Image (cartoon, grey):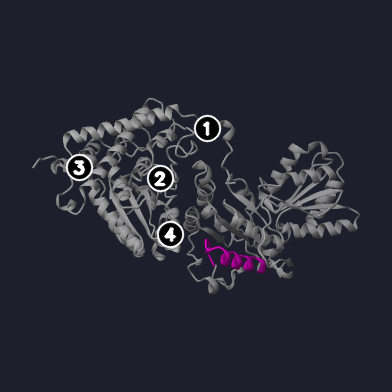
C-alpha cells in the first residue's frame, strides 16, 4: 500500500481500467489538457492515443449523446463534464435518453456509461462555474449517482461505475483532489449503494456527502472536545441510497444533521430528512437540521463565498442546535 | 409495354435486381397497410397511445434500410413504425406495443414512439426531436473503434434541423469521419408549422457543406432513388469516408399525430395533400413493377392479401396478449 492523492487515484484508475478493458474510453472537454480537469487525465493521451482519449468540442449535448450511443453499442465510455454547470446543456441526453433507455424498451437495451461530473468552485468563479447538482440527478429514475469523499472511494467507486451496466453519474469535487490516503494499487470496487460509518458515536448522526465528509470530520473532532459524541456517515452513493445505514444510526442516536454541498430546497438533505421522518420517526428526539448551500446562486466575491459555502463551523452549530432543542418548533 | 404511371425511370432500375424491387414494394405496402389499419384503430379508440403515422413516407425508410446490413443500426423518432417495419421488425410485436401489451416490442413500456428491435438493428427510437441523432453518431463511433465496418443511420424530420444537437452531431461526425448516415425525412411540416416558418434557409441538404460533408436532396417518394443514394452513402461510410446527409423530400398524408389529416384545422390545403397523394411512393413502384412484368395484377392481389393476413394476425395477437403485470411496474429501472 502507498499513499496517493484523490487526483492521482482517479488518474491511476482511468489508466488501469483502460489497460484492462478495450471497451473503456475517455471522452469529453479537456481530457488532453494539463489543467482543464485538474491533473486527473495527465499522461493518458500519451498512453492510449486520441482514439481512446477523445478531447471534444464544446458540444455538451451532442457529445453526451455520442457517449450514450457508444454505450448502447457495447462500449463503456467515461464521459467527463469538467464542470457540472455545463451539464444543463446535456440534460436532455442524460435525463431523456440515458436514464430512460433501459426501462423504455422493456429492459432490452442498456447504457453502461460513466458520466463523470466535476464540481469546481470557489476562488470567485461565481454562479456559472460553481454548481453542485447532485440532487438534480438523484431525482431522475434510471441514473445511479455516486459521490466519493476519499481517495480510496474515488478509485473503488470509479471502477464500480465503469463496470456497472447502467448510467452512473460519478461526481467528484476538486476541493477533494489533494486529499491523501492509502490506496491499493490493484483494481477493487466500492459497492454502489453502500454508505459507510466513518466514526461511531452516540449523541447525534451526521450524514455527509462528498467534500462535506471532510468538514463533518473536522466538526466531529471539535464536538468531541465539547463532549459531544457524533456518529459520521459518509453516504458515498446517493442512488441507490443506503437508507438502512442512516435509519440504524438514527435509531441509536435519535438526532440527525445532514450535510451536503448542494442547495437546500429539494436537496439531498431534504430527501434524507423525509426518509428518516417516514421510517424512524419514533426514534427522533429533535428536529432534523440540514447543512447546505443557501438557496442562492454562487457569488463571485471571496467575502461572500466565505458565508456561502458551509464548513465545519456550520456543522458544529447545526449539531448544537439539535442537541439544545428546547421542544419548540423551528431550529 | 403496359403504361402504368410511375415516378421511377426505367434507366434508374437497370442495375437493381428484380427481387430487390419486389421486396421493397412488399415492405412499403406492409408499412402502408399497417399504418392505415392503425389509423382506423386510433379512430375507433382501440389504440390509445399517441401514434404518428408514416403513411406517404414509406419510400424513405424502405429505400434506406434496403441498403443496410441486418447488423447495421438505425435510430428512429416519434414517427417510428415505418423504420421498425423497414428494418425487419416483427409486426405482431409492433401491434402489441401499440396496445400496451407485455408481448410488445418494448414490453408495453414504450408505446408507439419508443420501438426497439435489437435483433434487427433497431436499438430504439426517441420522442425528443433530434434526440437520437447523437446516439447514432455514438454507435458509429463504437463501430469505428472496433473496426467492424458497421454503419448507423439517424432518421429525423425536417423539424429536427432546428435543434442545436443536430449541428453538434453533424459537426462531430464529420470531424471524426464516422460511419453514420443522416437521413432527413423532409415532410414539409414541423408538427403544425410549415418548415418555411421554421428555417431561415430550407435547403437542409446544403447545410452539410458547413460540416464538409456530402449533402444531397432527393425525391423521397422514389424508393429507387432513395435506395441508390443510401447505398452510395453506406458504401462511403463503410470505407471510412465519413458521413453523408440525405434530405428526402416527402409528405405525410395523415396529420402530425393520430388518424386525422390536419385539413379540418386549416393547417394545410386539400390541393397540397392531393398533389402528394398523386405522387404515392407505392403506386410509383407498383407501376414500374407491372410495366416490367416483375409482378402481375394477380400477384399484386396475392401480395395484398398476404399482408392483410399478417396484419389481422398481428391484431389478434395484440388483442389476445396479456398486459404487463402491475407488480412489474418497477422492473427494469436499472439493469441488475
The answer to whether residue A132 is seen in the rendering is: yes
Let me know if marks 1 and 2 both belong to one chain.
yes
Is A29 in front, or is B235? B235
Residue identified by numbered label 4: B143
Return the disc, 2 or 3, that comes first in the chain's sequence. 2
B195 versus B238 height, above or below: above
Q: Which residues are magenta?
A: A8-30
Q: Give me the chain letter of mark 1.
A: B
Disc 2 vs disc 4: which is toward the camera? 4
The residue to which callout 2 is attached is B77
Tell me whether circle 1 and circle 3 mark residues in contact (CB < 8 Å).
Answer: no
Q: Secondary structure at mark 1?
A: loop
- Across and down, in percent, residue A191 comes to 68, 53
Gap between marks 4 and 3 measured at Cα: 36 Å
Name which of mark 4 and mark 3 comes first in the sequence: 4
In the rendered view, does B182 fall on the left or right side of A140? left
Q: Is residue A176 above or below residue B42?
A: below
Identify residue for label 1: B324
Asked whether the residues under the numbered discs 4 and 1 touch, taking CB atoms below 8 Å apart as contact, a structural biologist would say no
Disc assigned to residue B284: 3
Q: Earlier in the sequence, mark 1 or mark 2?
A: 2
Disc number lying in front (1 or 3): 1
N-terminal label among 2 and 4: 2
Does residue B319 belong to the magenta stretch? no
Q: Is residue A11 left or right of residue B180?
A: right
Q: Chain of mark 4?
A: B
Q: Callout 2: helix, strand or loop?
A: loop
Residue neighbourhood size for the residue with mark 2, other residues' Cα within 10 Å, grouped as few (<14), some (14–19), many (≥20)? many
Residue A11 covered by magenta stretch:
yes
Amino acid at each position: 500500500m502507498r499513499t496517493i492523492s484523490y487526483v492521482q487515484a482517479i488518474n491511476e484508475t482511468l489508466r488501469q481500467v483502460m489497460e484492462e478493458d478495450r471497451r473503456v474510453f475517455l471522452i469529453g472537454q479537456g481530457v488532453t489538457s494539463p489543467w482543464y480537469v485538474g491533473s486527473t487525465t495527465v499522461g493518458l493521451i500519451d498512453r492510449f492515443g486520441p482514439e481512446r482519449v477523445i478531447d471534444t468540442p464544446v458540444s455538451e449535448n451532442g457529445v453526451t449523446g455520442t457517449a450514450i450511443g457508444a454505450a448502447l453499442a457495447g462500449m463503456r465510455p467515461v464521459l467527463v463534464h469538467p464542470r457540472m454547470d455545463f451539464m444543463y446543456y446535456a440534460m436532455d441526453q442524460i435525463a431523456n435518453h440515458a436514464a430512460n433507455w433501459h426501462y423504455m424498451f422493456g429492459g432490452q437495451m442498456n447504457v453502461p456509461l460513466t458520466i463523470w461530473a466535476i464540481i469546481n468552485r470557489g476562488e470567485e468563479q461565481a454562479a456559472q462555474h460553481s454548481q453542485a447538482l447532485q440532487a438534480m440527478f438523484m431525482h431522475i429514475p434510471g441514473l445511479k449517482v455516486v459521490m466519493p469523499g476519499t481517495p480510496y472511494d474515488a478509485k473503488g467507486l470509479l471502477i464500480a461505475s465503469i463496470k456497472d451496466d447502467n448510467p452512473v453519474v460519478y461526481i467528484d469535487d476538486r476541493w477533494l483532489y489533494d486529499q491523501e490516503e492509502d490506496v491499493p494499487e490493484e483494481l477493487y470496487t466500492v459497492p454502489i449503494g453502500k454508505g459507510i460509518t466513518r466514526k461511531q458515536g452516540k449523541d447525534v448522526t451526521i450524514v455527509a456527502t462528498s467534500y462535506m465528509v471532510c468538514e463533518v470530520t473536522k466538526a466531529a473532532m471539535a464536538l468531541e472536545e465539547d463532549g459531544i459524541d457524533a456518529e459520521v456517515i459518509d453516504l458515498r452513493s446517493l442512488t441507490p441510497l443506503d437508507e438502512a445505514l442512516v435509519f440504524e444510526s438514527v435509531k441509536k442516536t435519535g438526532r440527525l444533521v445532514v450535510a451536503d454541498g448542494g442547495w437546500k430546497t429539494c436537496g439531498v438533505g431534504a430527501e434524507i430528512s423525509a426518509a428518516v421522518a417516514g421510517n424512524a420517526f419514533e426514534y427522533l428526539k429533535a428536529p432534523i437540521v440540514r447543512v447546505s448551500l443557501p438557496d442562492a446562486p454562487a457569488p463571485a466575491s471571496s467575502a461572500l463565498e466565505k458565508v456561502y459555502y458551509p464548513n465545519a463551523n456550520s456543522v458544529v452549530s447545526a449539531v448544537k442546535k439539535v442537541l439544545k432543542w428546547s421542544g419548540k418548533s423551528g431550529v | 409495354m403496359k403504361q402504368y404511371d410511375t415516378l421511377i425511370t426505367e434507366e434508374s432500375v437497370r442495375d437493381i435486381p428484380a427481387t430487390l424491387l419486389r421486396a421493397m414494394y412488399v415492405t412499403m405496402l406492409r408499412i402502408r397497410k399497417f399504418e392505415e389499419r392503425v389509423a382506423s384503430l386510433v379512430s375507433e379508440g382501440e389504440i390509445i397511445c399517441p401514434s404518428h403515422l408514416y403513411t406517404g413516407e414509406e419510400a424513405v425508410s424502405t429505400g434506406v434500410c434496403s441498403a443496410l446490413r441486418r447488423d447495421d443500426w438505425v435510430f428512429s423518432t416519434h414517427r417510428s413504425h415505418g423504420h421498425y417495419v423497414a428494418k425487419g421488425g416483427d409486426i405482431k410485436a409492433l401491434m402489441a406495443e401499440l396496445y400496451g401489451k407485455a408481448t410488445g416490442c418494448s414490453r408495453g413500456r414504450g408505446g408507439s414512439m419508443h420501438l426497439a428491435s435489437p435483433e434487427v438493428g433497431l436499438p430504439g427510437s426517441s420522442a425528443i426531436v433530434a434526440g437520437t441523432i447523437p446516439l447514432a453518431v455514438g454507435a458509429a463511433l463504437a463501430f469505428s473503434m472496433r473496426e467492424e465496418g458497421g454503419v448507423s443511420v439517424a432518421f429525423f424530420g425536417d423539424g429536427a434541423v432546428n435543434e442545436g444537437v443536430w449541428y453538434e452531431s453533424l459537426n462531430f461526425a464529420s470531424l471524426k469521419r464516422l460511419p453514420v448516415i443522416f437521413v432527413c425525412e423532409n415532410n414539409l411540416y414541423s408538427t403544425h408549422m410549415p418548415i418555411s416558418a421554421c428555417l431561415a434557409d430550407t435547403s437542409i441538404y446544403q447545410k452539410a457543406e458547413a460540416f464538409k460533408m456530402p449533402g444531397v436532396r432527393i425525391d423521397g417518394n422514389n424508393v429507387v432513388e432513395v435506395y441508390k443514394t443510401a447505398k452510395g452513402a453506406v458504401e462511403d461510410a463503410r470505407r471510412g469516408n465519413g458521413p453523408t446527409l440525405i434530405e428526402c423530400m416527402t409528405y405525410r398524408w395523415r396529420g402530425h399525430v393520430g388518424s386525422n389529416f390536419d385539413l379540418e384545422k386549416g393547417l394545410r390545403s386539400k390541393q397540397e395533400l392531393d398533389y402528394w397523394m398523386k405522387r404515392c411512393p407505392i403506386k410509383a413502384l407498383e407501376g414500374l413493377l407491372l410495366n416490367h412484368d416483375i409482378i402481375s395484377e394477380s400477384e399484386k392481389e396475392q401480395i395484398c392479401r398476404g399482408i392483410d393476413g399478417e396484419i389481422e394476425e398481428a391484431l389478434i395477437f395484440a388483442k389476445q396478449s396479456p398486459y404487463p403485470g402491475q407488480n412489474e411496474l418497477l422492473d427494469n429501472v436499472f439493469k441488475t
